[in-house]
Image (spheres, coloured by chain):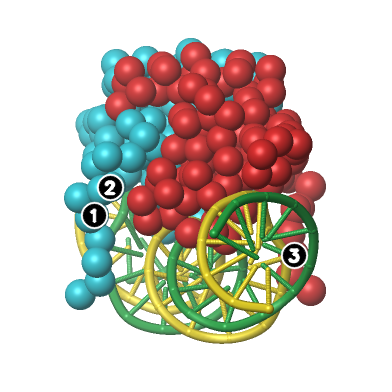
Chain colours: A red, B cyan, C green, D yellow
DNA sequence: TTTGATAGTCATAAAATTCTGACTGGTTGA
DNA sequence: TCAACCAGTCAGAATTTTATGACTATCAAA
C-alpha cells in the first residue's frame, strides 16, 4: 500500500487543490467552452483537437465532483447529456479572466 | 525525438499555461510564502514539510523563467540568494486570494 | 582542517497523468 | 436489421512529473 493523502496534505496552501483541479489537461478548454454554452461529450471531442475520450470523461467527472459542472440529461430528439456550469463554476469566471489577462 | 509543442498548443486556452505553471507541486506554497517575504532555498526546504531539493529547485527556476520570481544574491554575512515576487508575480496575488475564497 | 551553513546539480527511480484502441449499450432512422 | 449517433468504460502503454540519494562548490567559524 502506497502512502497517500497524508495529514499534511490538509495543511497545504488552500488554493492548491483547486488550482490542480483546474490545471488538469483539457480542463481549461472545457471550462472555457462551458462558459458560453453547456457542453456535450462528443461535441467536446470534436471541438478540442487532440483530446481523447478517456481524458475528457475523467475531466468532466472531476469538474462535476468538484461542483463546478452539473450534468443534465436532455430528453429530446437525440437524447443527450449537457454539462452546465454551476454557480460555483460561474464564480471562477473572473479568476479565469484575470489569468488570461496576465498570461 | 518526441513530438512536442505542436502548433495547436498555441491555440489552447490562454490561461492554461499559466494555470499549469502555478499548479505544479510546491508552487502554491512557494508563492504563498513569497508573498509575505522573499524566500530562500534552504529555508523553503525547512518550511515546506515533504518538499525535496530537486523539485524546489525546479519550481523556483520555472517561476523565475515565467517572470513571477526574481533571484537576488545578497552579499551579506552568510552570502545567500533571495527570491522575490516580481510585479508580474504580485499581480497574481488577487487571483490566489479569489481561489482561496472559493476553495 | 573539519564542521556546518549557503545553494544547488545529476542520474536514476518511482509515481502520477494522459493516451490508445477496443469494447459496451441505448436510441433512431433507413 | 443495419448503420450511425449518443455517452461513455476498461486495460494497458506511453509520457510527464516528482522524489531519492549522492555529489559539487563556496564561505566562515572552531
Instruction: Check if mark 1's residue and mark 2's residue have beta carbons within 8 Å.
Output: yes
* Camera-nearest label, 3 or 1: 1
Q: What distance separates the C-alpha of mark 2 from that of mark 3?
A: 35 Å
- Place of residue C14 in the rendered image (x, y in percent of width and height, measured from the top left): 59, 76
Give the letter of the chain under mark 2. B
Residue A74: give x, y in percent of width and height: 72, 35
* Image marks 3 and 1: residues in contact by CB distance under 8 Å: no
Element assignment for label 2? helix
Residue that carries the numbered disc 2 in the rendered image: B9
Q: Is residue A35 above or below residue D8?
A: above
Residue A17 visible in rendering = no
**Which residue occupies 50% across, 44% down?**
A43
Q: Quadrant of the N terminus of chain B?
A: bottom left
Residue B103 vs residue A28: left or right?
right
Percent x, y of residue A61: 68, 47
Badge number at residue A46: none
Q: Position of residue B46 (x, y in %)?
A: 56, 44
Above or below, comparing residue C16 to residue B27 in the picture: below
Q: Quadrant of residue B63?
A: top left
Same chain? Circles 1 and 2: yes
Q: Regarding mark 1 in the picture, which secondary structure is present there?
A: loop
Residue at 66 percent across and 39 percent down: it is A77
Q: Which residue carries the number 3 mark?
A: A3
Residue under circle 1?
Answer: B5
Amino acid at each position: 500500500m502506497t502512502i497517500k493523502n497524508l495529514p499534511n496534505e490538509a495543511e497545504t496552501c488552500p488554493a492548491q487543490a483547486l488550482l490542480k483541479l483546474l490545471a488538469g489537461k483539457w480542463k481549461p478548454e472545457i471550462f472555457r467552452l462551458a462558459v458560453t454554452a453547456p457542453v456535450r461529450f462528443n461535441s467536446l471531442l470534436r471541438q478540442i483537437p487532440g483530446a481523447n475520450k478517456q481524458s475528457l470523461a475523467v475531466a468532466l467527472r472531476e469538474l462535476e465532483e468538484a461542483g463546478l459542472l452539473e450534468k443534465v440529461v436532455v430528453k429530446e430528439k437525440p437524447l443527450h447529456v449537457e454539462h452546465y456550469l454551476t454557480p460555483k463554476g460561474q464564480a471562477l469566471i473572473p479568476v479565469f479572466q484575470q489569468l488570461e489577462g496576465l498570461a
